[in-house]
Image: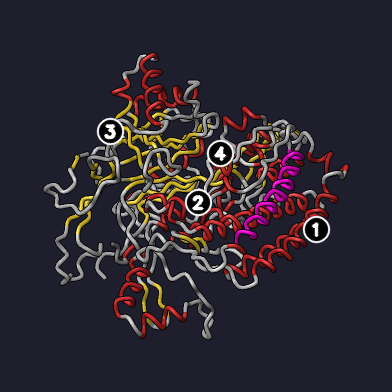
Amino acid sequence: MSAPAPHATRPAGNEDMSSTVRAFEAYGDGDWDDIAREAIGEERIVVNMGPQHPSTHGVLRLMLEIDGETVTEARAGIGYLHTGIEKNMEYRTWTQGTTFCTRMDYVAPLFQEAAYCLAVEKLLGITDDIPERASVIRVLMMELNRISSHLVCLGTGGNEMGATTVMTVGFTAREEILRLFEAVTGLRMNHAYIRPGGVAVDTPEGFTTQAREALTKVRGYLKQLTDLMLANPIFKARLTDVGVLNLSGCMALAITGPVLRSTGLPYDVRKDNPYCGYETYDFDVPTAKGADCYDRVVLRVEECYQSLRIVEQALKRLDHTEGEPVMVADKKIAWPAQLAVGGDGQGNSLEHIKKIMGTSMEALIHHFKLVTEGFRVPVGQAWQTVEHPRGELGVHVVSDGGTRPYRAHFRDPSFNNLQGVSVMCEGGQVADVVVAVASLDPVLGGVDR
Amino acid sequence: MSDVTPGGDQGSALTPPAGAATFEVVEVKKGMFGAHGSGDTSGYGGLVTPVAMPAASARPYGSWFDQVVDVLSEVLTDGGVAPDQAIEKVVVDLHGAASADAQQAELTITVAREHLVAVCQALRDDQDLRFELSLGVSGVHYPHDAGRELHAVYHLASITHSRRLRLEVATSDDDPHIPSTTSVYPSNDWHERETYDFFGIVFDGHPALTRIEMPDDWVGHPQRKDYPLGGIPVEYKGATVPPPDTRRSY
């Protein structure tokens, strides 16, 4: 080795800058110390809530200025879970991109996959060539994921207020959906299941029966949750008129999803700018008038029921399209889509291996090129949004004509919605901060990416 | 920025997307595999491939695109801004669709940075435009687009008219300043901080332009193309897997 390779923590060619950089320390006379000292002798204190606080949904840091029990100023600090996923995607093939973006918002992974793949398909110009069955499976998986994500939101939100039963019921119900995910994708999270051109593999045999049985149970758990929460006087006292953010506030801060719909505006990307054939499904967009945390809980429960409606329609369509392809016909894009778990535990398509290894040298070369090199995507940029459980998720992909994304940017709804923390919390009680943040339902994996 | 006619003397095998007449070169690729110094004997080492973004589309753009560009020009003229100076070019990406009426067709308006705020204001407030929702800022770094290396990309949505469009603003590495749009779209606050953090684009007039994802004392802007990904070789079953940024690229 000649010159040492540049390390990621410093830009190349700027080695001498490290000596001039100001150091920050976690103890002693840091800048935080000054802020805390300033407030000595007053009622007003500045408190760091998080990044390790159990109610911050991961590693959200809230900086609160408190006067007695009243929050006078609230700021959110993020970045503790930044892992450079967008940068990493620029060094992998377009197909490998799904493996990365699924890890962003890990509570709703299938939405990132779907939005990313739809954007790549736009660039490839194959939007209209996606097989019907692939779109149905995508819709089915996304709606199941919406229910499981809302269940986590409701469950953890209840837990943060001390209602442990809400959490246990929520997570038990989510478990049913995770089992379905495991049956289809092999994994409970980080699926990398939706791929540019379709989905990785068709649903297993007997899946629709299994799904219908699971959904009956989910419906039962949802009923339990509704009974536990919505008429509970303590629950209502804690949530009603807390964390209010009206329509103009939401529009100014571009807050979408259940928070926006709790102000009465029925804005839903599935209706406004449909994708994956959502215009052919029958469902409603529930709204509320109160614009407070209670209404957002009601909306999330109602959205779960609407998602169940869509899932039932999708299951019916799955039955009708049995045996149809789940990947585009273009072999220059489509990875071998029929995978099976082999004797070695690997998920290869044995039939495909038999063909490329035994009968066709050209097929072997093609397979090798497609998997290692990837496919080329025409030069240009594309933007795709989908209705994520937390709001509008946007994906901006740029291609330079190569086999890797030139740039992939995700407009994560949690990232944007966290801007609302200060307006929702200031003037309220400290205990209301927990409720208000829970009603935004941020997932820090998506916020920081 | 230089324009190249497809099939011209550059010998490019690229074909422009439908509706685009010329290219805007943003990058030049050399060789076949992106790897250098390895004694490439394939004969492709001398290959030079210009990479070019679709250039301005010709009228009519199709669908509602013409109307939006016309109304925007009108509103800008009323506000004392010459539309020719504010709007640098208009690109319609059909993304494989037969016409601009298809769901996947996209409208991109490239705006001169000094008129960005006026354009945003017009797009948000005029009743025929009403792009009320800004869906954030995305940066792109094109180190080969001389004088226009840094691009800020804004995606706007109109709930009133169910429309979406993209604004693109370019600036140079030497003068990485773009006016902040937070006065029109307060939601762009964090998004501009993110773009500053990752690309070093300075948004003038932003209320508190600080880093958001990286630590405050971080040096460099990680999403720029000259910033290394980093990584170490990994040994797996006796073989060594090189870090991703030193692998072949195509």
Residue A65: x percent and y percent?
Answer: 67, 36
Q: Chain of mark 1?
A: A
Q: Quadrant of residue A290?
A: top right
Closest to the observer: B79 or B12?
B12
Lateral position of residue A233 relative to residue A397, left or right: right
What mark, if any, has residue A115 been given in the picture? 2
Please tell me which residue is depicted at 49% across the width and 57% down the height of the picture. A101
* Residue at the extreme front: A320
Mark in front: 3 vs 1 = 3
Check residue A180 in the rendering and tell me which mark sits there, or answer none: none
Q: In the rendered structure, which amino acid carries the disc numbered 3?
A: Ala
Q: Quadrant of the N terminus of chain A?
A: bottom left
Disc 4/disc 2 C-alpha distance (Å): 15 Å
Magenta-drawn segment: A293-318
Labels 3 and 1 in the same subunit: no
Q: How many marks?
A: 4
> 10 Å neighbourhood of mark 1: few (<14), some, or many (≥20)?
few
The three-letter amino acid code for the residue at tag 4 is Asp
Q: Is residue A399 visible?
A: yes
Mark 3 neighbour density, 10 Å: few (under 14) some (14–19) many (20 or more): few
Which type of secondary structure does the marked residue at label 2 adopt?
helix
Comparing labels 4 and 2, the label whose residue is closer to the camera: 4
Cα gap from disc 4 to disc 1, whole angstroms: 31 Å
| Chain letter, disc 4 residue | A
